[in-house]
Image (cartoon, rainbow, N blue to C red):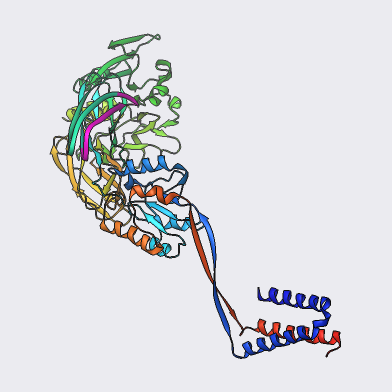
């Protein structure tokens, strides 16, 4: 500005000389006097300070906190009313400024930082529950406009939790079972509606009346009409707008099974049918039918007529596909198949290539999974060997040189078990001959149960645990243990392992009641944990999240102090709800700026030299130099 002024002054002086030539001596004298004044100011290092002001119109905005903690008590009504009345002036925020923030955390500092791009006076509607991001007070000190936090009365948070869903893990078709929903609530009054969906369809609705703080249980009955896995989904709602903490909804999974399993034996005419009948008669829940392969392509049907067997035993049939063409499809759809390979049986339909070993007896070595007594088992004869890799199978009996005799694989939803030693039933008779007939029956029962659809269901199941836990909150971990017939198993050995990123805990379970095993755990660190239950023949696992105490639901006195500090740092003040309209009108802000002119700067010396040069030039031109 000073340079422009000097330039204008010089131009004006030059023009004056052209117009008023009679006053040229006076004009040049004035220029010399000004140059001497400039020289004097430079010598004494004179400086001049002054203030300029500028007026600017700004419209106040409503920065409104829509995080989870703002939905408790009457705060949700306050937020709704403000958003309705002042829609055009609303800027919502939670973890950041956004049209629809998730609301999981509150980040006042980041919201103020975003407002710096286009600052204006702010009315801040928040409970002050800041739990993420930079320090808002530090940012507020540099904010150029006042912030007016709205005082919101603190209320006790409302909370509604479904604590447990309890019921059977397994039902048989035709059974009616009771399920229990445990719940708890705080600061809730009025009706609470529980809706129960089973496989996506609403089946039951229950209503209880809440009276402040409390809890209880609601029950409902379910009649099982068809087999399959069932998923119960329970949700609880109230007249209040509740914050969804994933605790007011829960899921429970159970299975419905056939009460009796149909078993079909396909065999040559032999004592096998009679032996098998004696074995199966001691197994509950099995309905037996047999097809005896006669000569001249004739068949003999014994027992029940079975069209859709769930357990199939093929005993030394040369061409199994001729008797049961869809055996592989049945296995993939859930049937259990036992294939006894002897004589000239063709296993190619099952994807196996075998060759017959030299005719000599081999001694079987049981896998620990068979859990047999420590005795010398009778030898097998007529052993078939697998051609190719057999690592895909689970071996139950093997020879001493590691060739598999009895092994199985899972195919689709079913299981196929192979017995390559022939004759297997002669093996049973040999056991009977040495006084071990009961052991022979037991081995056969184990093999049948191993492929049975019932036995393939999980025998150890962890009861549902809430999706989220807090540090220091003790929980009871429960699991149920079942026999292969899906009957609760007593006197079992069950233990739990709980593993996180940096911790691992092992707990021994105690039997709380028949088939129910319990242990208690109190988490000390936040994080993701895997809870695994172990028994001698099965395991089950589930995931649990442990978090700090929910900082979006707790009121602390420091919250109110934060809002007060924000107002003080920006020249604002705490206001009440009814003061919002008066502050939302357009306000005129006077922006003042300090300026300073110093004659110490080199630029001033250059200007002085310019003025002296200009005077000399003009005097020269006028002939006065």
Residue 283 visible in the picture = no
Location of residue 320 with respect to 186 vertically, above or below: above
Across and down, in percent, residue 98 comes to 46, 47
The image shows residue 381, relative to residue 504, as above or below, that is above
Which residues lie in the magenta part? 184-202
Q: Position of residue 173 (x, y in %)?
A: 25, 20
The residue closer to the viewer here, 618 or 584, is 618
In percent of width and height, residue 91 lies at 45, 48
Taken as a whole, is the magenta stretch helix, strand or loop? Answer: strand
Q: Quadrant of the N terminus?
A: bottom right
| Residue 186 lies within the magenta run | yes
Going by the image, does 625 lie left or right of 599?
Answer: right
Task: Please state if 421 lies on the left or on the right of 117 as rendered.
Answer: left
Judging depth in this view, the residue of 170 and 566 nearest the camera is: 566
Is 168 a magenta residue? no
**Where's residue 224, x and y in %?**
26, 21
Q: Is residue 415 left or right of residue 163?
A: right
Q: Give the residue furthest to the front.
A: 22
Check the image and report above or below for 44 versus 126: below
Q: Quadrant of the C terminus?
A: bottom right
Is residue 143 among the parts visible in the rendering?
yes
Picture layout, residue 467 above or below residue 12: above
């Amino acid at each position: 500005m000073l340079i422009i002024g000097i330039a204008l002054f010089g131009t004006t002086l030059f023009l004056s000389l052209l117009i008023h030539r009679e006053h040229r001596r006076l004009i040049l004298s004035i220029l010399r006097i000004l140059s001497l004044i400039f020289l004097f100011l430079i010598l004494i290092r004179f400086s001049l300070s002054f203030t300029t002001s500028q007026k600017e119109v700004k419209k106040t905005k409503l920065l409104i906190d829509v995080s989870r903690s703002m939905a408790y008590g009457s705060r949700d009504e306050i937020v709704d009313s403000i958003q309705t009345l002042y829609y055009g002036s609303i800027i919502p925020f939670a973890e950041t400024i956004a049209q629809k923030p998730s609301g999981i955390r509150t980040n006042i500092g980041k919201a103020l930082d975003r407002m710096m791009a286009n600052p204006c006076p702010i009315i801040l509607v928040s409970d002050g529950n800041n739990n993420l991001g930079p320090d808002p007070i530090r940012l507020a000190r540099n904010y150029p406009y006042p912030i007016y936090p709205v005082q919101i009365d603190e209320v006790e948070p409302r909370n509604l939790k479904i604590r447990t869903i309890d019921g059977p893990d397994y039902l048989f078709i035709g059974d009616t079972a009771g399920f229990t929903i445990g719940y708890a609530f705080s600061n809730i009054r009025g009706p609470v509606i529980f809706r129960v969906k089973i496989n996506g369809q609403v089946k039951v609705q229950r209503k209880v009346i809440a009276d402040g703080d409390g809890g209880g249980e609601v029950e409902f009955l379910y009649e099982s009409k068809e087999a399959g896995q069932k998923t119960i989904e329970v949700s609880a709602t109230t007249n209040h707008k509740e914050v969804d903490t994933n605790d007011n909804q829960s899921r429970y999974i159970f299975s419905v099974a056939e009460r009796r399993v149909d078993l079909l034996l396909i065999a040559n005419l032999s004592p096998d049918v009679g032996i098998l009948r004696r074995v199966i008669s001691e197994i509950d829940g099995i309905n037996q039918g047999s097809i005896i392969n006669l000569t001249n392509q004739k068949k003999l049907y014994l027992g029940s007529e079975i069209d859709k067997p769930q357990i199939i035993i093929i005993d030394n049939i040369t061409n199994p596909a001729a008797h049961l063409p869809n055996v592989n499809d049945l296995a993939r759809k859930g049937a259990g198949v036992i294939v006894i390979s002897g004589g000239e049986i063709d296993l190619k339909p099952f994807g196996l290539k075998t060759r017959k070993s030299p005719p000599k007896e081999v001694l079987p070595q049981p896998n620990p999974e068979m859990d047999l007594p420590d005795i010398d088992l009778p030898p097998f004869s007529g052993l078939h060997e697998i051609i190719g890799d057999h690592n895909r199978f689970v071996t139950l009996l093997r020879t001493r040189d590691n060739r598999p005799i009895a092994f199985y694989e899972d195919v689709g939803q079913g299981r196929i078990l192979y017995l390559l030693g022939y004759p297997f039933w002669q093996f049973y008779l040999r056991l009977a001959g040495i006084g071990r007939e009961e052991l022979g029956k037991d081995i056969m029962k184990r093999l049948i149960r191993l492929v049975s659809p019932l036995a393939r269901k999980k025998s150890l199941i962890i009861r549902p645990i809430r999706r989220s836990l807090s540090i220091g909150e003790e929980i009871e971990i429960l699991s149920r243990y079942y026999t292969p017939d899906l009957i609760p198993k007593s006197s079992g050995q069950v233990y739990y392992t709980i593993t996180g990123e940096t911790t691992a805990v092992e707990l021994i379970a105690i039997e709380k009641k028949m088939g129910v095993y319990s242990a208690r755990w109190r988490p000390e660190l936040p994080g993701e944990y895997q809870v695994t239950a172990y028994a001698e023949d099965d395991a089950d696992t589930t995931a649990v999240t442990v978090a700090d105490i929910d900082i979006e639901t707790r009121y602390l006195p420091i919250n109110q102090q934060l809002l007060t500090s924000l107002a003080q740092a920006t020249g604002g003040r705490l206001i009440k709800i009814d003061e919002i309209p008066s502050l939302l009108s357009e306000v005129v802000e006077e922006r003042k700026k300090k300026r300073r002119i110093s004659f110490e700067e080199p630029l001033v010396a250059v200007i002085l030299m310019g003025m002296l040069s200009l005077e000399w030039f003009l005097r020269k031109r006028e002939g006065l130099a």
